[in-house]
Amino acid sequence: MHTVLLTGFEPFDKDPINPSWEAVRRLDGVQLSEDAQIVARQLPCAFATVGACLTQMIDELRPTMVIATGLGPGRSAISVERVAINVNDARIPDNLGEQPVDTPVLADGPAAYFSTLPIKAMVKAVHEAGIAASVSQTAGTFVCNQVFYLLQHALAGTGVRSGFIHVPYLPEQVVDTGQPSMALLTMVEGLRVAVCAAWETGVDLAETGGQVS
């Protein structure tokens, strides 16, 4: 049986829930094919410990594919990330109170890693399911980007495809704030469709997903 590891984050910044984990945990055990299923795991929102947790999960599960997810405040769509950069620049402290500024994720690592997922095919599939989705050109500079970078570094050259998806707030998190959100059931279905497309697509689509600015 092939395992697709799907991760979400614990709550952070004094919020009682994190939509990435709320959505991901509902996909635990979902079959992608006769010989492949999703295994959901939660990651800590902490620069100092998240790398070791991610490594432990990969060593334990030996997944065929890994997709990490996180909250993207202010986003209105399922955002499939293109690139992780080698910098930590935290706007707020993490859950251990750490707030690195302009430090590398890995001192000797390359400037960036690209997703090895079929990001355009994933976005198209989610669109076709009637759910908002887009290719994102930045995963930020907080723990989400760190996880994305460490994931790509760990799996580089292994043949295990991997990447990162940001999800919006849940409606109950942004009442009276005017910030965009997405219903939980919509988010769950969007992630399921995206993961299925990633699993089923060997060569990505050659169509635009860029931005002017």
Image (cartoon, grey):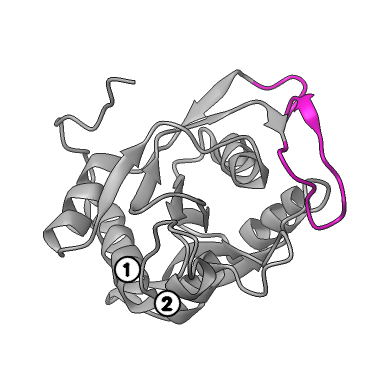
Q: Residue at x 51, y 65 (%)?
A: 20
User: Is 11 left, or right, of 81 in this rendering?
Assistant: right
Q: Which image quarter: residue 109?
A: top right
Q: Residue at x 51, y 77 (%)?
A: 25
Q: Amino acid at mark 2?
A: Leu
How far across and how far down the image is residue 159, in percent?
Answer: 44, 41
* Residues at discs 2 and 1 in contact (Cβ within 8 Å): yes
User: Is 84 left, or right, of 124 in this rendering?
Assistant: right
Mark nearer the N terminus (2 vs 1): 2
Q: Is residue 98 magenta?
A: yes
User: Is 187 left, or right, of 196 in this rendering?
Assistant: right
Residue 18: numbered disc: none
Disc 2 designates what residue? Answer: 27
Label 1 neighbourhood size at 10 Å, few (<14), some (14-19), many (20+)?
A: many
Instruction: Residue 118: tell me if it is visible.
Output: no
Main SS of the magenta part reads loop
Q: Which image quarter: residue 58?
A: bottom right
Residues at marks 2 and 1, CA–CA distance in whole angstroms: 7 Å
- Quadrant location, the N terminus: bottom left
Q: Which image quarter: residue 179?
A: bottom left
How far across and how far down the image is residue 135, in percent?
Answer: 31, 39
Q: Is residue 105 magenta?
A: yes
Q: Residue at x 35, y 53 (%)?
A: 76
How far across and how far down the image is residue 186, in percent?
Answer: 30, 72
Disc 1 designates what residue? Answer: 192
Looking at the image, is 170 positioned above or below residue 78?
below
Label 2 neighbourhood size at 10 Å, few (<14), some (14-19), many (20+)?
A: some
Q: Which residues are magenta?
A: 90-109
